[in-house]
């Protein structure tokens, strides 16, 4: 008899959710974590980033309080206290996860795990032990991409792991390489703190997002002093008396930017180094684990979820959902979570949240669409809270009248997107969404306006107010 029904490797948002759900369903579960419970998301990703960004955003609002009749002088950032608050928040949530393990009788092993066979996992800690299980779930997550060659070894080069560690990285002039979600959130954080920020990337800003979102966010951040340089490749970084000299090639010309530090934010790759020991049966592609629709590897009783898998969307809530569905598959139940409607969120200011198809994506798929848009400068909550230009867009299938997508760039977008997730999952029509009463004054009223724009029934005229 195996020691466990399930061994989970990695206690991040995919692994710990799967472990607890498995125990709730009656499985004997062990989970192995080499660092801290909560994985990257809790310790060096989602939660610490948002904690820092919340403080920096609050600081920027305080500095501009005059428009609300609030006079502030001498407001300062104490970076050490800001990080202390971040660390306390992380520690509280981490402790909560460990208590959930105990409450659900999930055995937590601290150490580095290696799969040594179809049913065996070796754990390296003070003393190595080998455990057996009927099923193994790999949830080892991802790791930051680094700069090529020797550039990554230069003093003053950081990744998200460094920036979101226990101690602050105090920079005044920053070059951020990359223009995706991680890069833009770091740009927002440091910019709000009053730092000089340059975003440099090969591609356009948020290239996978709706073009209007990308253009508007770029415009807003430029107004706040962020510099953007696209179509640029890093060629060299060298130490100078004043910091670092970064040399890029941009459209066959040389671009030079001097700074105190460089943040490599080009994305993340699968974290599977050393995972297989004397057992090379698992199919991988450039380190990422290949899985089927049930998150099974080519070895049927070994599963993988989250950022370590090939083609992963690399979102914490996706890993959690995949983890729950793996448990459903192991015990012979239908999938617990619908994976067809996945929201994406960016915590810049204004926030960005999307789900489903944009109008351009729908047209590429040959779907005839009708769209609605509401610019939020007519929304009372947006005006009274002094928000900048923001909007909502909704996309409906022209033939079925069912909603197939939504793109939000506004305050509380990351909270409001859930209404659209539910609407798409349920196949709601424009008339059905229009018929819902939403409270006033709220940001969520914008949903009614955007939907009624599709129906030609919008009744609120946006005032000519510059946001």
Image: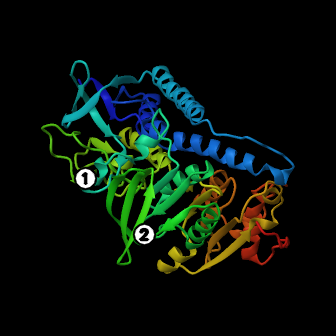
Residue extending farthest top: 127
- 142 relative to 94 in the view: left or right: left
Location of residue 355 (image quadrant): bottom right
Q: Position of residue 18 (x, y in %)?
A: 42, 37
Residue 428, how many percent across, how many down? Answer: 66, 64
Quarter of the image for the C terminus: give it: bottom right
Indicate whether 466 appears above or below 161: below
Q: For numbered disc 1, what is the local secondary structure? A: helix
Q: What label does residue 205 carry, if any?
A: none
In the picture provided, is 109 more to the left or to the right than 97? left
Q: In front: 93, or 104? A: 93
Disc 2 packing (10 Å; few <14; some 14–19; many ≥20) = some
Q: Is residue 247 above or below residue 29?
A: below
Viewer-side label of 1, 2: 1
Instruction: Say how many tags the image has.
Output: 2
Residue, x 48% and y 53% (percent of image)? Answer: 174
Q: What color scheme is it?
A: rainbow
Q: Residue at x 58, y 40 (%)?
A: 51
**First in sequence: mark 1 or mark 2?**
1
Residue 155 lies left or right of residue 371; in this view the side is left
Reading the image, the residue beneath label 2 is 203
Task: Count neighbours of disc 1 (C-alpha within 10 A) and say few if under 14, some if 14 to 19, many if 20 or more.
Answer: few
């Amino acid at each position: 008899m195996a020691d466990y029904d399930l061994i989970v490797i990695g206690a991040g948002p995919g692994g710990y959710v799967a472990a607890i759900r498995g125990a709730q369903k009656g499985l004997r579960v062990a989970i192995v974590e080499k660092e801290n419970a909560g994985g990257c998301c809790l310790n060096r990703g989602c939660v610490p980033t948002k904690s820092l960004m919340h403080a920096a955003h609050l600081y920027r609002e305080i500095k501009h309080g005059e428009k609300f009749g609030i006079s502030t002088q001498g407001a300062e950032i104490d970076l050490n206290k800001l990080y202390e608050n971040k660390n306390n928040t992380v520690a509280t949530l981490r402790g909560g996860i460990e208590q959930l393990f105990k409450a659900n009788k999930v055995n937590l092993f601290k150490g580095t795990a290696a799969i040594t066979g179809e049913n065996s996992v070796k754990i390296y800690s003070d003393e190595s032990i080998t455990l057996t299980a009927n099923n193994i779930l790999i949830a080892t997550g991802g790791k930051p991409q680094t700069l090529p060659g020797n550039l990554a070894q230069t003093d003053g080069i950081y990744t998200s792991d460094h920036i979101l560690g226990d101690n602050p990285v105090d920079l005044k002039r920053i070059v951020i390489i990359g223009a995706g979600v991680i890069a833009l959130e770091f740009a927002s954080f440091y910019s709000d703190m009053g730092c000089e920020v340059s975003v440099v990337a090969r591609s356009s800003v948020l290239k996978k997002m709706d073009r209007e979102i990308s253009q508007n966010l770029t415009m807003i951040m430029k107004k706040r002093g962020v510099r953007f340089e696209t179509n640029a490749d890093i060629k060299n970084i060298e130490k100078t008396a004043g910091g670092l000299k970064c040399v890029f090639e941009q459209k066959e010309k040389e671009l030079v930017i001097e700074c105190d530090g460089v943040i490599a934010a080009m994305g993340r790759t699968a974290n599977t180094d050393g995972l297989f020991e004397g057992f090379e049966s698992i199919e991988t592609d450039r380190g990422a684990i290949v899985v089927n629709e049930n998150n099974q590897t080519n070895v049927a009783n070994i599963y993988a979820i989250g950022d370590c898998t090939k083609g992963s969307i690399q979102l914490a809530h996706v890993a959690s959902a995949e983890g729950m569905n793996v448990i459903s598959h192991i015990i012979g139940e239908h999938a617990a979570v619908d994976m067809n409607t996945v929201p994406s969120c960016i915590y810049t200011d204004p926030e960005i949240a999307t789900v489903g198809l944009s109008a351009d994506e729908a047209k590429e798929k040959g779907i005839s669409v009708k769209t609605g848009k509401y610019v939020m400068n007519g929304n009372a909550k947006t005006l009274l809270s002094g928000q900048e230009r923001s909007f909502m867009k909704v996309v409906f299938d022209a033939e079925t009248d069912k909603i197939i997508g939504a793109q939000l760039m506004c305050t509380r977008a990351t909270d409001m997107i859930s209404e659209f997730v539910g609407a798409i999952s349920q196949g709601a029509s424009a008339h059905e969404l229009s018929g819902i009463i939403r409270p006033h004054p709220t940001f969520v009223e914008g949903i009614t306006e955007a939907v009624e724009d599709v129906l030609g029934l919008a009744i609120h005229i946006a005032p000519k107010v510059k946001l």
